[in-house]
Image (cartoon, grey):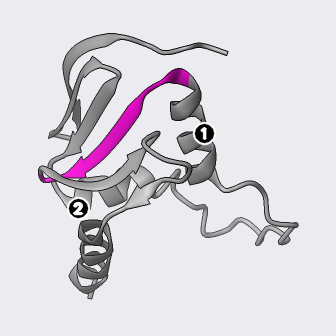
Amino acid sequence: MASGLDIEAQLVVTLDGDEVQVAGTGGYLIINFPSQRVFDKITAGPPKDPHAPPKPKGPPGPDPLQQLNDLARQLGLVLDLRVAGKTHVTFGAGSSPKITINAVFGKIGSFFRKL
């Protein structure tokens, strides 16, 4: 596998009028979402068809967060996902992803915005 990536990047991606910032130097990459609403929208996945029959539940697959963490470690990267400038999850810095209390409070707060 790769021994490590060395990156230099600054990028702003506009999604539905919201700017997502990507910056990196060396082996450290930061992705900053402007708000919890934007983060939830991006991580929600594709829209669900209300007329589609329910899918049968199969055996649980591998944990996608752990897979992303393992990939970041193999590439020698630390990936820092932020929402409004506060770190929510860090991948590649340890044996498992590090989820912060900001992520927990952000997710709890997003439930109340839907009411």
* The disc label shown at residue 36, or none: 2
Element type where label 2 sits in the image: helix
* The disc label shown at residue 45, or none: none
Mark 2–mark 1 CB contact (< 8 Å): no
Three-letter code, disc 2: Gln
CA–CA distance between discs 2 and 1? 25 Å
Residue denoted by label 1: 70
Main secondary-structure element of the magenta-colored stretch = strand
**Residue 88 coordinates in the image, percent (x, y):** 29, 57
Residue extent of the magenta highlight: 75-84
Instruction: State the image quarter where residue 63 is shown.
Output: bottom right
**Does the magenta-highlighted stretch encompass residue 74?**
no
**Residue 78 horizontal side relative to residue 64, left or right:** left
**Residue 39 coordinates in the image, percent (x, y):** 30, 54
**Does the magenta-highlighted stretch encompass residue 77?**
yes
Q: Residue at x 60, y 39 (%)?
A: 70
